[in-house]
Image: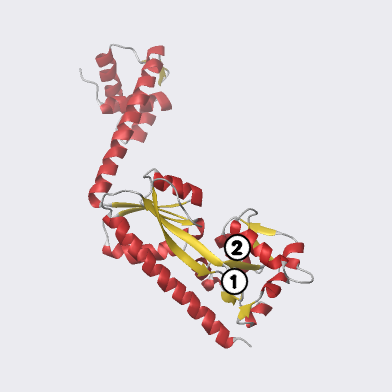
Amino acid sequence: MKITTAQLDAFSAVLDLGTATAAASVLNTSQPSITRAIKQLEDATGLVLFNRTKGRLVPTADARDLALVVADNHQGMLRIQEAAKGIRRRRIGHLRIACLPAFAQGFIARALTDFLPGHPHVSVFVRPLASTDIRNAVSKGLIDIGIAAYEVEAPGVRSTRFTECAEVAVLPKEHPLAARGELTPADLATQTIVRLAGGDPYRTRLDTLLSGCAGQTPALDGPVIEVETSAAACALAAEGVGIAVINPLTALDFVPAGLVLRRLTHTLPFITTLVRPAQTGKAPLADAFATTLATRRDADLATAADLCAAQTGQAT
């Protein structure tokens, strides 16, 4: 007699749950069907798999040995199912995206809103990663397109500059410094600054700028407010904890939360890199999404500039 998947499913369920009734409930079938499947599996294998004791099916030693092989079989079936899903995704198109956590909530979402109407059958996977992890994933061919911080040069990676925009200060509209059109390092030095984690190059750059201010610098000498991402810095700024100095693309995400953008008198460039696998084959979906990303970037930077200009006009 041939062993079937239904028999193995029934066997595993009874092994886990102890009764045919419970197994039937989980597998959405009847108790007699479970009992019949177990009997058929015993006939096919020539093994006694369960002892019937007070309404329960107690597994024998043979059943536990067989269970190890059945578990391997189930894993094999899962791998086949996942492979089939992958093949279907390739047939309809799939796009694997990685980005900085700062871009995962707002910028990438806006870019996908632009992209997906023209590609309704594409499966999309977005992974927020650190820059090093993005570089490694792209070099291994695990990601089709990514946005990493700073300059990126690595074997197996094709990189192009994505942003080199000036960072902005973000603060609640009720903050006293919100009345100014642009902020100086001396302005910032008198405030609590929500800063990125120590060791981040942009954190180091900002600290160096503030340390050059004469007199007291509460931004450096006072309590430290430190976060891992610029999005987290904005969230704290929105609650009035302090001022954040971040990239304008992320800053836009928090304008609805009551934050305003202010230019800085000292330009602090925010540099990111678009990374792709260094492949020679065609990648039309990644090419199309790269175009969408550039268009969305330009639109968002223009919006941020307009907000700064409008605020400058309202400053006193």
Decide: is 267 above or below 228.
Answer: below
Q: Is residue 212 visible?
A: yes
- Of labels 1 and 2, earlier in sequence is 1
Q: Amino acid at mark 2?
A: Ala
Q: Nearer the viewer, residue 3 or 313?
A: 313
Q: Nearer the viewer, residue 35 or 209?
A: 209
Instruction: Provide residue 251's location: percent of width, then percent of height.
Output: 53, 69
Look at the numbered disc 1 and give the secondary structure of its residue: strand
Q: Residue at x 29, y 65 (%)?
A: 117
Q: Residue at x 54, y 67 (%)?
A: 269
Find out whether the residues at labels 1 and 2 contact each other: C-beta distance under 8 Å: yes
> Which disc, if any, is residue 13?
none
Could you classify mark 2 by the number of other residues whose Cα lies within 10 Å: few (under 14), some (14-19), or many (20 or more)? many
Which residue is farthest right?
A: 215
Instruction: Report which quarter residue 224 is drawn in.
Output: bottom right
Q: Amino acid at mark 1?
A: Val
Q: Is residue 239 visible?
A: no
Instruction: Provide residue 67's location: percent of width, then percent of height.
Output: 38, 20
Residue placed under numbered mark 1 in the picture: 170
Which residue is farthest left?
A: 1
Could you classify mark 1 by the number of other residues whose Cα lies within 10 Å: few (under 14), some (14-19), or many (20 or more)? many
Instruction: Provide residue 285's location: percent of width, then percent of height.
Output: 29, 56
Q: Residue at x 62, y 64 (%)?
A: 236
Residue placed under numbered mark 2 in the picture: 233
Look at the numbered disc 2 and give the secondary structure of its residue: helix
Q: How did the renderer colour the structure?
A: secondary structure
User: Which quarter of the figure is the C terminus placed in?
Assistant: bottom right
